Image (cartoon, rainbow, N blue to C red):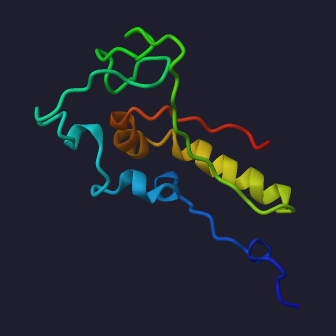
Amino acid sequence: MPAEHSWERRLPLPSSPARALPKATDPRVRSAGSSPVAAGRARVLAVTSLKRSVALPDVPTLAESGYPDFDLNDWNGLFAATGIPPALVDRMQAVVAEAIKDPKVRERLDPTGADLVANTPV
């Protein structure tokens, strides 16, 4: 009997944390270190989050700059169809949690100022 949903077929998950997030280790992905700011062609005036960026610790937040209620962040997440097997959700979360600990992944993402979190599924 054919699978009704694509997730019902066996999904190969990466065996290596670095392979779980291939773009994070791809040298073509731009980071703060390769930006116009790093090249001295632009200057960062403020960051939009309530806390200072790890990648730009000397740059104030907009809240520190006189806009106390300004808090703008972006985030990324993994989503799945309703009814996905809990074991697959748990496996996906475990792979991501392991990947963000990988030194190669951290080496690529830390300079971007990303605050890496591997929350448990909700």
- Residue 28 as seen in the image, left or right of residue 42: right
The vertical placement of 89 against 51, above or below, is below
Q: Is residue 87 left or right of residue 27?
A: right
Q: Position of residue 106 (x, y in %)?
A: 41, 39
Q: Nearer the viewer, residue 8 or 30?
A: 30
**Residue beneath the point at 40% across and 16% down:** 61
| Residue extending furthest toward the left | 40
The quarter of the image holding the N terminus is bottom right
Q: Position of residue 32 (x, y in %)?
A: 28, 37
Q: Quadrant of residue 10?
A: bottom right
Percent coordinates x, y for residue 84 in the rendering? 82, 62
- Residue drawn at (39%, 23%), measured in percent from left and top? 53
Q: Position of residue 103 (x, y in %)?
A: 41, 40
Residue at (75, 71) in percent of width and height: 7
Q: Quadrant of the C terminus?
A: top right
**Number of marks:** 0
Q: Compared with residue 6, is residue 68 higher up or lower down, i.e. above or below?
A: above
Name the residue: 33% across, 21% down.
Answer: 46
The residue lying furthest to the bottom in this view is 1
Q: Nearer the viewer, residue 58 or 117?
A: 58
